Image: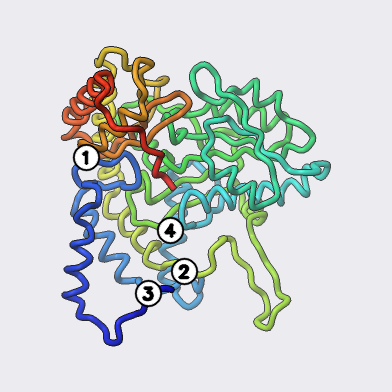
Amino acid sequence: MGMQLPETGQRWEQLRAEMAAMRGHDLDWKHGRHGAYVWYAGDELEDVLREAFGMFLVENGLGLRAFPSIGRMEEETLATVQWLLSAPEGAAGIFTSGGTESIFLAIHAAREWGKVHRPGAARPTIVAAHSAHPAVSKAAHYLGMEVVRVPVGADYRADVAAMETAITADTVALYASAPTYSLGLVDPVPALGEVAARHGLWLHVDACVGGILAPFVRQVGHAVPPFDFSVAGVSSVSADLHKSGYTAKPASTVTFRTAELREFARYSMDDWPSGLYSSYTFTGSRPGGAIAAAWAGMHFLGQSGYREIAAASMRAKAAIAAGVAAIPGVIVHGTPELWAFSFGSPEVKMGRVAAAMAKRGWMCGPTTSPPGIHVMCTPVHEPVAGEYVAAVAESIDEVKAGAAPEAQRAAYN
């Protein structure tokens, strides 16, 4: 049936008021009530991102010859990411719409690379830990590939020996996470790099969550294991600008060790009336505003700004993790190195705890293996850490008393 447009246009003042009213039931993300989706570091940065995006609202990132300003900002942003990821001279990147596209392009490149370097692969496969993000399986589904998921080790990280055992003649790539989305744990990338080199395989590192901010976590004094191009066996790394880079959506990157490897991500065809069509990205038109906002946001923050965000995020993580671990029966899963982690308790059903938290205004992402609640800390979580821990304790007591609501299905899409 559809919904018919009004015959005459409405005034912006009226529409703005209606849109503002629509937000009345949205999550209070400015005050840290979110467990995902939003990476917010203050109104001042938000204003910069909004204005920069608006300045290039109409420009299309597909037409860089028409908009050299967008081309320059994209090139400089990709170069900054390469610097952050310790990429060698000759590395090359692609600006994408998000982590899923970045991972898709890396897996597509690995498949095309495999046609040259692993020609015996009948059905190209990727070996990944069970903890790998669904985006790798989504990419494989679209690309006619297969993901072989291997159980994680006792520390919840990728089991290197088990992954090596899973390699067959069909394997073209290995997949690592830095960190895993659910538990916030960095896989043993150096060991996986050695396996990849030994077997002549592509190694992709999914650093969509951690790639941009992790170097600054190191700078403020926290140990972060090697995960980027400092590891010799790494072929490509995906890192989201709109996550730990704190820029506007949609913005992510995938970086390749060499420009030659990036060429395997390209799609080209010329059998149509307009001649050669050639593109690295899956999407055609690309919002120039996202590129502009990424460039502006990163330059606005600078290294000192990112260090402040890193320090605040790690303080929030430390306070919340210590607080929930002090609740009887609650444990933090593994030893997460960055600002994301998961916690749970064998004494209660954590899905019900999450539902009880939602009743108190906190959106909690569930984990199933092991059962728990996932926390992605940002600077706005630091001042509410105590409130969060208190809400967890109250929710657990409510579940134990049998008064908590039924668990709800995860809302992550």
- Depth check, front residue: 206 or 92: 206
Location of mark 4 (residue):
76
- In the structure shown, which secondary structural element does the residue marked by tag 1 occupy? loop
Location of mark 3 (residue):
3
| 378 shown above or below 94 | above
Disc 1 from disc 3: Cα separation: 32 Å
Location of mark 1 (residue):
361
- Residue type, label 4: Glu
- Whole-percent x, y for residue 127 in the image: 65, 34
Foreground: disc 2 or disc 4: 2
Q: Earlier in the sequence, mark 3 or mark 4?
A: 3
Label 3, residues with CA under 10 Å away: few <14, some 14-19, many ≥20: few
Place residue 305 in its image quadrant: top left
Display coloring? rainbow
Disc 3 from disc 2: Cα separation: 31 Å
Disc 2 from disc 1: Cα separation: 39 Å
Q: Residue furthest right?
A: 120
- Residue type, label 2: Gly
| 320 shown above or below 24 | above
Task: Say if mark 1 contacts mark 3, CB within 8 Å.
Answer: no
